[in-house]
Image: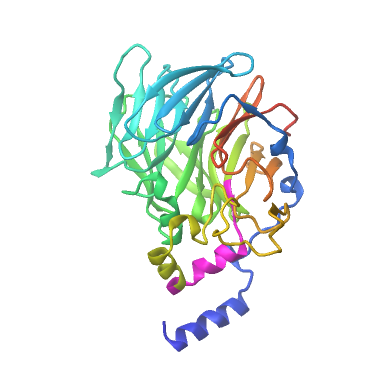
């Protein structure tokens, strides 16, 4: 980068200091920090690699963790039954109205598991390209299936490479109930992570992590309507959203945005050298969990003192679950702050016994039984 390029960049940073995606919104109102997530009850033993959780409508939940999908039932969700085991990591889950379980599998595609048949059926390709990085799947009331691929050709576990390279080549894919006739509805998306269909089947909701955005599209006979941005500048990186049973959604935020990360994303030369020379865990990048290694960034006294992470410090990792009303406005939230225990929230679902939450950073499934407006 030449001197003139540096000068232009500095001028832009002064003139448009808080413009667009550069301004991280504060956590206030319904998103005001609290410790309510840390008071949630851990369910069972740790589940390393826990990723998604969905409710079956009869009091049980399905959970993806590592290469397995589990069913948890009973009044306290302690009855654990193995549903499926795959050759690679299991991710996003959905239940089809006909009883099949849909599972996003890293490096392979979308599996449809029929309880009456031993082998799953697969959707592995859309528009001539393999579905390597599927993250989430949702089903419309009419049985049509929608899935999002965070980054075409890249596995989900390479997400930090994706954000640091500022890629935007994710896809929204749809297919029939029988995994037939796959079509790409949207492409070149900045890491679409979550997808959901409204209970009435009239709208599709989509989160895009790298632009911190929540959008809504009308669903009709002609496919997707125009994009409506519901939240265009969120304070963190949105993950999956699942219905709350009352017309709203439960949205996981898997990491907070920080000014340090936003700065590094502007410094192309530094970022390229960091990625080429430093171990992945020590990058200045979003993290699902942090604070346990003295070599991590952000270890100065204003962040940690005498080995104790300050709750108000700029977070290396964070836990945040947001409740959205039917219009997509935040109405309440659960937090695990910088010094908390349960970070990296990737999904949550509503059950008669409370909100069940997947804290991937902590490798724990949590139960919140308090109020969530």
Residue 24 is left or right of residue 99, and the answer is right
Q: Nearer the viewer, residue 327 or 234?
A: 234
Q: Which residues are magenta?
A: 254-269
Q: Per the image, is 336 magenta?
A: no
Which quadrant is home to the N terminus? bottom left
242 lies above or below 35: above
- Camera sees residue 150: no
- Taking the spot 46% from the left edge, 28% from the top edge, the residue there is 94
- Camera sees residue 307: yes
Q: Nearer the viewer, residue 33 or 283?
A: 283
What is the x, y in percent for residue 227?
Answer: 50, 49
- Taking the spot 70% from the left edge, 38% from the top edge, the residue there is 38
* Residue at the top extreme of this rendering: 116
Which quadrant is home to the C terminus? top right
* Residue at the left extreme of this rendering: 128
Residue 61 is left or right of residue 304, and the answer is left
278 lies above or below 327: below
- Taking the spot 52% from the left edge, 79% from the top edge, the residue there is 9
Q: Per the image, is 258 magenta?
A: yes
What is the x, y in percent for residue 311?
Answer: 72, 52
- Taking the spot 56% from the left edge, 62% from the top edge, the residue there is 297
């Amino acid at each position: 980068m030449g001197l003139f390029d540096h000068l232009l960049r500095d001028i832009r940073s002064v003139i448009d200091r808080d413009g667009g995606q550069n301004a991280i919104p504060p956590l206030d109102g319904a998103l005001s920090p609290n410790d309510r997530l840390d008071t949630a009850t851990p369910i069972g033993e740790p589940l390393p690699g826990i990723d998604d959780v969905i409710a079956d409508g009869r009091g049980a939940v399905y959970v993806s963790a590592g290469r397995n999908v589990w069913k948890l039932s009973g009044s306290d969700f302690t009855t654990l039954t193995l549903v499926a085991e795959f050759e690679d990591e299991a991710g996003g889950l959905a239940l089809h109205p006909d009883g099949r379980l849909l599972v996003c599998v890293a490096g392979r595609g979308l599996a449809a598991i029929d309880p009456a048949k031993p082998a799953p059926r697969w959707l592995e390709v859309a528009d001539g390209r393999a579905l390597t990085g599927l993250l989430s799947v949702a089903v419309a009331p009419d049985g049509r299936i929608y899935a999002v691929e965070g980054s075409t050709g890249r596995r989900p576990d390479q997400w930090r490479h994706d954000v640091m390279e500022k890629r935007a080549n994710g896809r929204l894919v749809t297919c029939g109930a029988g995994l037939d006739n796959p079509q790409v509805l949207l492409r070149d998306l900045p890491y679409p992570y979550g997808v959901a269909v409204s209970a009435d089947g009239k709208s599709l909701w989509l989160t895009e992590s790298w632009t911190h955005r929540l959008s809504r599209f009308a669903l009709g006979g002609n496919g997707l309507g125009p994009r409506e941005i519901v939240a265009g500048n969120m304070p963190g990186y949105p993950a999956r959203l699942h219905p709350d049973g009352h017309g709203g959604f439960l949205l996981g935020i898997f990491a907070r945005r920080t000014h340090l990360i936003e700065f590094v994303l502007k410094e192309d030369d530094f970022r390229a050298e960091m990625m080429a020379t430093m171990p992945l865990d020590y990058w200045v990048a979003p993290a699902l969990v942090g604070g346990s290694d003295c070599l991590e960034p952000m270890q100065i006294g204003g962040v940690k003192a005498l080995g104790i992470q300050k709750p108000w410090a700029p977070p290396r990792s964070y836990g945040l679950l947001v409740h959205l009303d039917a219009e997509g406005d935040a109405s309440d939230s659960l937090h695990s702050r910088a010094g908390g225990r349960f970070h990296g929230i990737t999904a949550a679902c509503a059950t008669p016994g409370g909100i069940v939450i997947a804290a991937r950073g902590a490798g724990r499934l949590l139960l919140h039984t308090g109020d969530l407006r």
